[in-house]
Amino acid sequence: NAGVTQTPKFRVLKTGQSMTLLCAQDMNHEYMYWYRQDPGMGLRLIHYSVGEGTTAKGEVPDGYNVSRLKKQNFLLGLESAAPSQTSVYFCASAQTGGSYNEQFFGPGTRLTVL
Amino acid sequence: KQEVTQIPAALSVPEGENLVLNCSFTDSAIYNLQWFRQDPGKGLTSLLLIQSSQREQTSGRLNASLDKSSGRSTLYIAASQPGDSATYLCAVRPPPGNTGKLIFGQGTTLQVKP
């Protein structure tokens, strides 16, 4: 099992450019999450999905869109990148949202917006 | 609004020392609390998950306790080793529990010196 994988690992964008981050999991998990991690602020939830075809907003959703067309994939899109979106992005998955389930994290994508 | 705080932000200890990392949260209404480890440039690895009805969990040299009424959790590391050097994050799962959303602290960066 590869677990949770993220593509790409690094990316540099110019302000106004768009891109899509791909998260894939091979554990047949229902729930998937996108977080961003900034220095001194811990991880903050951007969007999440409780199953194929569903998405919901997290704590900091502005400027991002997501899609969950296939159960194993969760895509995070930036339509018009801004320097404030420079961050490390982590994807996570869990079997369910129940309290006994742990979240498993990917290795992260480091994004710089110039 | 739930807030999670970890103090200190950084800690340096000599090898072999027992140490305690602290996590506090403002709202005692949580479903569970998780401790994670993050190595530089890497994703998060789950260490321990404590249900709201539990007082502690143990895994090897790690012991995590939870006191919901006071809004505190501690991660105890016995006989620390240089390989324990990493950032440790705690996260709480607030209601509604079925979404699986986590709220993270900022982390404590631990350095264990040989």
Image (cartoon, coloured by chain):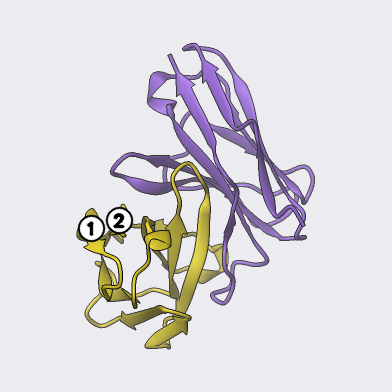
Name the residue that disc number 2 marks.
Answer: B111
- Mark 2 or 1, closer to the camera: 2
Q: Does the image show residue B28?
A: no
Q: Is residue B52 above or below residue B43?
A: below
- The residue under the point 51% across, 38% down is A89
Q: Does the image show residue B75?
A: yes
Q: Is residue B4 left or right of residue B37?
A: left
Asked if labels 1 and 2 touch by Cβ distance under 8 angstroms, the answer is: yes
Name the residue that disc number 1 marks.
Answer: B11
Please identify the quadrant where the N terminus of chain B is shown. bottom left
- The residue under the point 40% across, 58% down is B103
- The residue under the point 57% across, 21% down is A79
Q: Colour of chain A?
A: purple
- Compute the Cα span from label 2 to label 1: 6 Å
User: Where residue B55 sits: x, y (%)?
Assistant: 37, 88
- The residue under the point 43% across, 13% down is A114
- Between B30 and A55, the residue placed more toward the observer is B30
| Crowdedness near tag 2: few (<14), some (14–19) or many (≥20) residues, C-alpha within 10 Å | many
Q: Colour of chain B?
A: yellow
Please identify the quadrant where the C terminus of chain B is shown. bottom left
Q: Is residue A18 left or right of residue B72?
A: right
Chain hosting mark 1: B
Q: Is residue B85 above or below residue B51?
A: above
User: Where residue A47 sits: x, y (%)?
Assistant: 54, 45
